[in-house]
Image (cartoon, rainbow, N blue to C red):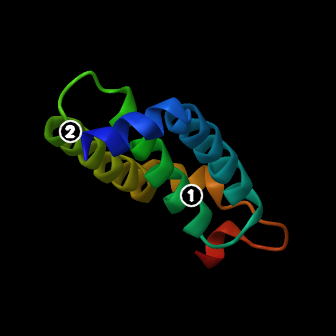
Amino acid sequence: MYDFLLQLQNWRVMEISFILAVALILIDYFFPVDFPAYIGYFFFAFGLFFAMPFGPLLSLLFALGLFLLLLAMHAVWFSRFLTNAPGMNPEDR
């Protein structure tokens, strides 16, 4: 298990996950559904898993906590800004 995680770190999974997360969250601006943002939040939490200096279990808990926090923030605040797809009225939501 540790060898696999170290190999993923050698492949720059953390940086790729953060870039992919930002791209998916920005792409969500053009779609009336929130699915790309949810995947982006997952990839951001996945990248955080590799960024944490703790053991795998504690890093997993931090990543899961961040993912749930991002989902809650999306429901409360982010969805107002990410739902501007062409042809969609904010009142339709």
Q: Amino acid at mark 2?
A: Pro
Mark nearest the camera among 2 and 1 is: 2
Q: x%, y% of residue 48?
A: 39, 35
Tell me the residue at 45%/32% (across/down). 9
Residue in front for this viewpoint, 78 or 19: 19
Q: Is residue 56 left or right of residue 16?
A: left
Q: How packed is label 2: few (under 14 Cα within 10 Å), some, or many (20 or more)?
A: some
Spatial separation of the CA atoms under disc 2 and disc 1:
25 Å
Where 35 sits versus 13, above or below? Answer: below
Residue in front for this viewpoint, 83 or 6: 6
Residue in front for this viewpoint, 55 or 4: 4
- Please state the total of marks drawn on the protein image: 2
Q: Which residue is mark 2?
A: 56
What residue occupies the far bottom of the structure in this picture? 92
Residue in front for this viewpoint, 83 or 65: 65
**Disc on res. 82:** none
Q: x%, y% of residue 90?
A: 66, 67
**Disc on res. 37:** 1
Q: x%, y% of residue 58?
A: 15, 36
Splitting the image into 4 quarters, where does residue 60 fall?
Answer: top left
Q: Is residue 1 visible?
A: yes
Q: Give SS at disc 2.
A: helix
Q: Give SS at disc 1.
A: helix
Q: Amino acid at mark 1?
A: Ala
Tell me the residue at 67%/59% (across/down). 28
